[in-house]
Image: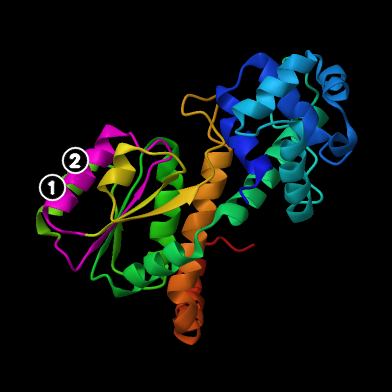
Amino acid sequence: MENIKLKIREKYMHMSKAEKRISDFILANAFHSLGMTAQDLANGSGVSAASIIRYVQNLGFDGLSSFKMALAAANSQDDDWNATVDPIINTQDSLQTLSGKLEGLINGATKDFFYQLDYEALEQAICKVRNARRIYLLGIGASMLPAYDLFHKLKRADYNADYYFDINMCVEFFHYIDARDLVIAFSYSGQSREILYSCQIARERQTPILAITRREESPLRRLADLSLLVPNQEAVVRIGAFTSLHTSLLMGDLLYLGAVQKDLPELESNIRSTRKLVEGLKTRE
């Protein structure tokens, strides 16, 4: 059964104000909501009882009873998540409130990430990383950070990996790629023109494309040979990349850990050696 909490959080940004109030109340009172009537939920959310019925029907349920069954199942999987889903800051928020919102946002995103993680796709992706002749990482804007972070980790583990801040330079070098290589494209929206153009070139050269993107159909997913999906919790137009950045970094870390797992003794030796080289740049008192 699909986790209803995950479904609510993914749909949250596209909900009406009334639906958001209902979502906030239910997710903050997930256990108590099981014993409430439609009128109880309406009173707690500040909406009408009819709005509650429309809400559960819009989520795909025949009525409140079937919705509660799904909520009970989600509670058994996730018995301690208790935070508001609304990440938007308020001018009246104290630092403690902002901290609490961010904590709830990241905790919820992390739990959703591992709940919906496709281990079979991840295993296939790890095999592609391990067997690639060269690995080209793509990412712009907020997606630049997880792309560059994974590049650095792979490079330190002696993988033949490349990341270019200048997308024009990257496209030039795609002249040399072929089926032996791998392109890893980070794009939460799956719509960034620079990333799509690069992937189209890779596809023409029969180079496998691994997309790390959100759980929603997009041009990038249609171009990719394999997709690793992160929860679709954040609007594409947003005040800042919070959950999308966090979950994309998590996916990159899992790719890296899976890739180097079989080479730990050699990796540990390389890490110690590279650390000694970097120590030469440290100023000692």
Instruction: Evaluate whether residue 89 shows in this view.
Output: no
Q: Residues within 10 Å of mark 2 (few under 14, many from 20)?
A: few
Front-most of residues 1 and 134: 1
Identify the image quadrant of residue 140: top left
- Could you tell me which quadrant the C terminus lies in? bottom right
How far across and how far down the image is residue 24, in percent? 75, 28
Task: Please say whether residue 113 is one of the residues in the magenta stretch.
Answer: no
In the image, residue 189 sits, relative to residue 270, either above or below, namely above
Q: Amino acid at mark 1?
A: Glu
- Asked whether, in this view, residue 175 is left or right of residue 193, the answer is left
The residue indicated by pointer 2 is 168
| Residue at 25%, 40% in the rendered image | 196
Task: Please say whether residue 194 is one of the residues in the magenta stretch.
Answer: yes
Front-most of residues 216 and 113: 216
The residue indicated by pointer 1 is 172
| Residue at 19%, 69% in the rendered image | 180
Identify the image quadrant of residue 208: bottom left
In the image, residue 209 sits, relative to residue 64, either above or below, namely below
Mark 2 touches mark 1? (CB < 8 Å): yes
Element type where label 1 sits in the image: helix
In the image, residue 265 sits, relative to residue 98, either above or below, namely below
Front-most of residues 104 and 122: 122
- Asked whether, in this view, residue 107 is left or right of residue 224, the answer is right
How far across and how far down the image is residue 211, in percent? 35, 51
How far across and how far down the image is residue 159, in percent? 33, 70
| Residue at 51%, 61% in the rendered image | 253
Q: Which residues are magenta?
A: 178-207
Q: Amino acid at mark 2?
A: Asn
| Residue at 77%, 36% in the rendered image | 65
